[in-house]
Image (cartoon, rainbow, N blue to C red):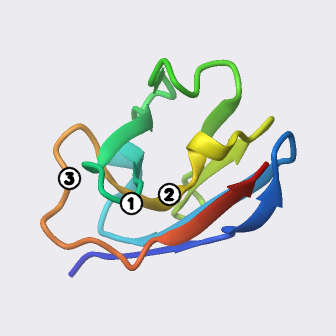
Amino acid sequence: QVQLVESGGGLVQAGESLTLSCAASVRAFSTYAFGWYRQAPGKQRVLVASITTRGYTYYADSVKGRFTISRDNAKNTVYLQMNNLKPEDTAVYYCNLAPSPYNYWGQGTQVTVSS
């Protein structure tokens, strides 16, 4: 049974930073690629960053150069370091398998960036 628990969100001002964490309860964590997805109000959920089993990363153009995804296989945890946050980054952030997510999503963690 897969469990995904996101944490670390909050309310920040533009230009500030946050680091999100995803604790993944899944067998053979190190054999899966993971991604961070976000969903803004009234928008579709989109993939913003992913990391493969070998550490290769992908970033959406909207976050490239500002966000960094990483993983700690010993802790079954995926991180998203977000720097220079912008109001348009406001969304609920979720972690899941990538590029094909598991059918069950966690509750996500809210990131709100004020101007």
Q: CA distance from mark 1 to mark 3?
A: 20 Å
**What type is the residue that disc 2 sits on?**
Ala
Q: Which of 88/103 is in front?
A: 88
- Mark 2 neighbour density, 10 Å: few (under 14) some (14–19) many (20 or more): many
**What type is the residue that disc 1 sits on?**
Pro
Query: Splitting the image into 4 quarters, where does residue 15 fall?
Result: top right
Residue at the left extreme of this rendering? 103
Q: How many marks?
A: 3
**What type is the residue that disc 3 sits on?**
Pro
Residue for point 54% across, 71% down: 109
Q: Position of residue 43 (x, y in %)?
A: 30, 50
Q: Is residue 52 visible?
A: yes
Q: Is residue 5 above or below residue 9?
A: below
Q: CA distance from mark 2 to mark 1?
A: 7 Å
Q: Comparing marks 3 and 2, which lies closer to the viewer?
A: 2
Left or right of 19 on screen, residue 64: left
Left or right of 85 on screen, residue 67: left
Q: Position of residue 50 (x, y in %)?
A: 42, 35
The residue pinned by badge 1 equals: 41
Mark closest to the chain's N terminus, 1 or 3: 1
The residue pinned by badge 3 equals: 101
Question: Which numbered disc covers residue 6?
Answer: none
Q: Is residue 32 visible?
A: no
Q: Is residue 19 above or below residue 84?
A: below
Q: Position of residue 115 (x, y in %)?
A: 79, 48
Quick check: marks 1 and 3 in contact, CB under 8 Å? no
Q: Secondary structure at mark 1?
A: loop
